[in-house]
Amino acid sequence: MTPVVKTVNLVKIYSDGAVPVPAVRGVDLQVEPGEFVAVMGPSGSGKSTLVHMLGGLDTRTSGEIWLDGKRVDTLSESAWALLRREKIGFVFQFFNLVANMTVGDNVELPALLAGVSPKVARERRESLLAALNLTERADAAPAQLSGGEQQRVALARALANKPSLLLADEPTGNLDSRNTRDVLRLLGEVHKEGQTIVMVTHDARVAALADRLVSLFDGEIVDDGRIARRRSRTAGEVIDLR
Amino acid sequence: MRLHLLALLAKEPAHGYELKQALEQTFGSAYPSPNIGQIYVTLGRLEKDGLVRAVDVEQSNRPNKKVYYLTAKGRDLLTTWVDEPTEGPRVRDEFFMKLVLAPLTGIADRMALINRQRRHYLSLMSDLNDLLERTPPADRVAILLIEGAMLHLQADLDWLERCQEDLA
Ligand SMILES: Nc1ncnc2c1ncn2[C@@H]1O[C@H](COP(=O)(O)OP(=O)(O)O)[C@@H](O)[C@H]1O
Ligand SMILES: [Mg+2]
């Protein structure tokens, strides 16, 4: 099977400041279709830079990026824009919602842009909004939403056209526990349906949904392995009340 | 289990099997289903220490059953237990000891230890995720307990990251 993501010796050095900052230093990463990869690591370890490059939002300094078997690090800005629309869903902090469109339309737009029929796009919108407990906010403007609501809308929008790749950078930062549970459930479901996911997160509950954990440190992958699943029992057996 | 049984007996006198049921009802799936033998052994010790007393109640067609009730001494102990502040949970110091001492042994490097531990924590968390998903919302005590365990695990993971920044 062709990997959804493949990077070869990927390097990013920021050289806009006085001293060059090597943010990503030779990353070889391969993600298979349907895989859910969590990316963790201390602040400044290069997580955001890595996923931004995977989505074409930041240019690489050297190395290769392949998406669905196609070399993409050499693409023009406009070719990237097209690719993103067709293949990639984003949940990034600065990748904002369209301010003058309602929440519902924000969610529906990507599917329409990707050429899905209006009927299917509408169905997808309704089911995503319902899954994230946002149905009542469908007619609100993004600015009227709380931080946690905006994050959930961003997730719904990212999933609207069933992208080959979902890229997310700290998608649950502002969520309370009830909303996190909705997000966990939705992520678990789309993953079960085969959605490929690469997600940066500090939230262990979210990371624990992944099949695999990639740990970054100083711009390098220092650990890459599966998260073991153990078949669990009852709360009393997992937690020692004494 | 001593104080848990005293607390249940403070509400009303009961025999061993009723205490088992009361524990199950109060804690839901959160409590490892108490073994009836263990409950009788604990009641015996409480009786010996003068914290509870038992009366024999006659039953038709069956041997007498023992109904336990709280003594004044038992109530005092219980009040002290409830009133005094409780020790906080300890950090997982066994892993920390390994981490600090590992370089002396020449067996494992710290980066490898931290990475393995991180994945272990996530696998525990995945267990808790499953558990939370399977626990009915009405089982509130169990849900709170699971959420508490998740928060502790998150703190362990954050701490691991701090260790990585400073020690690895
Ligand atoms: N636009 C930028 N210009 C210069 N340095 C940057 C820029 N963005 C990030 N960096 C630096 O690159 C390194 C990795 O940053 P980042 O990818 O944001 O890490 P993380 O997401 O893991 O916290 C850090 O040292 C950061 O200061
Ligand atoms: Mg970041």
Image (spheres, rainbow, N blue to C red):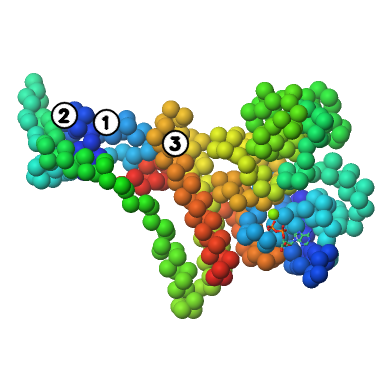
Amino acid on which disc 3 is placed: Ile
Q: Residue at x 67, y 51 (%)?
A: A200
Q: Secondary structure at mark 2?
A: loop
Q: Of the residues shown, which amino acid type is indicated by label 2?
A: Pro
Q: Which residue is mark 3?
A: B143
Q: In front of the other: label 1 or label 3?
A: 3
Residue at the far top in the pictured view: B60
Residue B59 pos. (x, y %): 9, 23
Task: Determine whether, in the image, residue A151 is placed left or right of residue A181.
Answer: right
Dot 3 lies on which element?
helix
- The residue tagged 2 is B13
Residue at screen point 90% across, 58% down: A74
The structure residue drawn at horizontal position 88% and vertical position 45%, both measured from the top left corner, is A81
- Cβ of mark 3 under 8 Å from ligand 2: the answer is no
User: Does mark 2 have its CB less than 8 Å from ligand 2?
Assistant: no
Report the residue marked by disc 1: B21
In the image, is A235 to the left or to the right of A70? left
Gap in angstroms between the C-alphas marked 1 and 3 = 19 Å
